[in-house]
Image: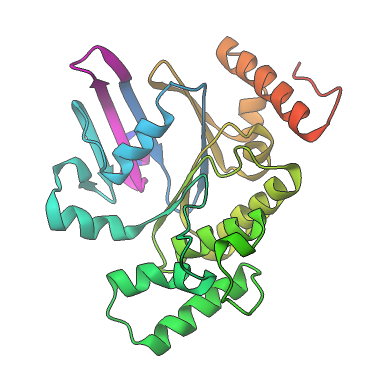
Amino acid sequence: MSKEAEGAAAVVLKDVFKSFRGGRDQILKGMSISFLPGQLTYVLGPSGTGKSVTLKHILGLLAPDSGSVHVFGIDISKLVGTPLTEFRQRFGMVFQNSALFDDMTVFENVAFPLREHTDWSEGKIISEVEEVLNKLGLPKPYDKFPSEISGGMKKRVGIARAIVRRPEILLYDEPTTGLDPETRQTVDELIEKIKTEFKLTSIVISHDIPSALRLADRIVFLDGGKAVFLGTPEEFIESKQPKIVSFLKAEMVAYQALSGIKNVSHS
């Protein structure tokens, strides 16, 4: 990674090592990667290769054993307590299962971070929540509970809650895992809409190759606790790295099984 690219990046992990169980389980083994502002980056790789651990370092939920994690030029691993809590307000997080509060309505779920982290008036909160829900295609009324709406609508609500405070960086944790093809398509359209309309720096942890190839500005591939590929979707699909070729074949077989598609291969 060049100094020029590093300086322009929104997030930079540099030579990050992280292990657990007293060093017996080493997950990150010199992770170096940058995420550019305003771009949508998909982070792909086999299970256990460090995707979620990388995400937790970016959020400051984990501190590296060695190396550094800079977000907007600030070493986030050096922040603790209130400064770290306040810094995290610059992030939005979309969880795999939406993580909605079951006892709150659609409106209350989206309004929750505004009521918790701002001193806005109720009128301003109502206006902001309704604007975001409208942009994401959720029809009124907003008084239904999560149990009363579809999986696709739950995803919309989860994304609306993540962006209602207008974060600078939006993180997605496996947003399409386990979804039926129609809901996967809905989530893809939402990710694309947010990329186009909100211009956020977006990082998606995923196994979803079709979504990555369609939506990403850049794809990162992790293997063995390191970033072994960084490039465009076109460069990724043409890569001859054995681990990438193997990953593509395996994940496309799984995708075909889920969506009923046949005779799709990677040559």
Q: Which residue: 51% across, 44% down?
A: 96
Q: Is residue 133 magenta?
A: no
Measured as percent of width and height from the top left, residue 129 is found at: 49, 76
Q: Which residue: 29% across, 37% down?
A: 57
| Residue 22 in view of the camera | yes
Q: Quadrant of the C terminus?
A: top right
Q: Quadrant of the N terminus?
A: top left
Measured as percent of width and height from the top left, residue 60 is found at: 25, 43
Magenta residues span 5-27
Display coloring: rainbow
Q: Which residue: 64% across, 51% down?
A: 187
Extreme residue toward the bottom, this view = 123
Compared with 38, 137 (above or below) is below
Compared with 157, 65 (above or below) is above
| Residue 1 in view of the camera | no
Q: Which residue: 41% across, 42% down?
A: 35
Compared with 259, 193 (above or below) is below
